[in-house]
Image: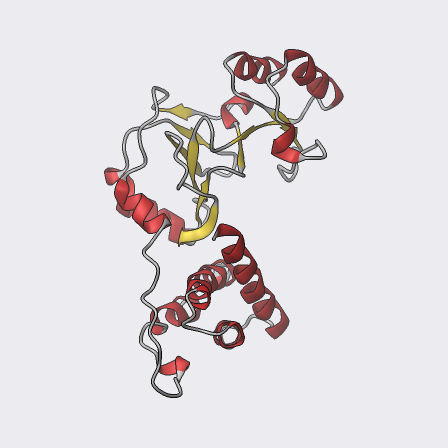
Amino acid sequence: MTDTALQLAARGVPVFPCKNADKKPHTPHGFKDASTDPAIVAAWWKQWPDALVGVPSGHKFVVLDLDLQHVEAQEWYAKNQTTLPTTRKHVTRSGGRHIFFKPRADFKCSAGKIHPGVDTRGIGGYIIWWPAHGFDVMHGGGLFEAPEWLMRELNPPAPRRVVPSGPRTLRSDKDLEPLVRVILQAREGQRNTATFWAACRLAEHVHSGQVSRSDMVGIITDAAVRTGLPHSEAKAIAHSALRASTRAS
């Protein structure tokens, strides 16, 4: 691992050590501490010899992060992989995929925005460099541009703001029914992921002024509770999605 970290650093790719158990940074400022200085890198791995090799995203590359433990992510990948370019891919420890693209400023970090189990890593994020730990590299050549259809899914047009002429019954709004249905149809083990994804989408309506924060939290919480999630947990997911949406915007 030390050799791989030093090799990456020698190629101008900054690295930093992460904990093996949870992939969180060992260093106090996380990816902001990443370095190409061989003395610093060697000292880190002397201190933490089993550390994972972390690499900041955004400057050298951006990453489509597929968590293929989730059925939704498997289905999304099966549907879309033929339209993704043959760019560099890493197999992850969980059996997922890191798909690399050339860096671009509008490829931002997101969690479940494109689809449940489909995340993105851009400026302000990082990944584990899994080849340093024995996992396969697929199509290890140069990087391709992220396809425009993927960028549209990551950065969809802002919903058209509609000024209601009178009181609005949100629970009958046909724009919201598909989001609620995602939650209600989620299987056990997928309810949290589906709830968070739907909550992130509805949070976009909050930021566009179409839905109030309280209505958004109520809609998400009510739907999630109907699937068996505890009320407090469902409400916490809704608030977490609001915070994530605020950071992304």
Towards the viewer: 157 or 73: 157
Quick check: 87 left or right of 4?
left
Residue at 49% x, 37% y is 123
Towards the viewer: 119 or 20: 119
Quick check: 193 left or right of 154?
right
Residue at 39% x, 68% y is 179
Residue at 27% x, 47% y is 79
Q: Is residue 232 above or below residue 54?
A: below
Which residue extends farthest right?
47
Quadrant position of the N terminus in the picture: top right
Towards the viewer: 130 or 172: 172
Quick check: 231 left or right of 151?
right
Which residue extends farthest left?
83
The answer, for residue 187, to whether it is visible in the render is no
The answer, for residue 39, to whether it is visible in the render is yes
Query: What is the count of numbered marks?
Result: 0
Quick check: 242 left or right of 74?
right
Which residue extends farthest bottom?
166
Towards the viewer: 198 or 93: 198
Q: Is residue 109 above or below residue 35?
A: below
Residue 17 is situated, as x and y percent measured from the top left of the image, at 65, 27
Residue 187 is situated, as x and y percent measured from the top left of the image, at 44, 64
Residue at 41% x, 24% y is 137
Q: Is residue 71 above or below residue 177?
A: above
Visual colour scheme: secondary structure
Residue 184 is situated, as x and y percent measured from the top left of the image, at 42, 71
Residue 241 is situated, as x and y percent measured from the top left of the image, at 52, 60
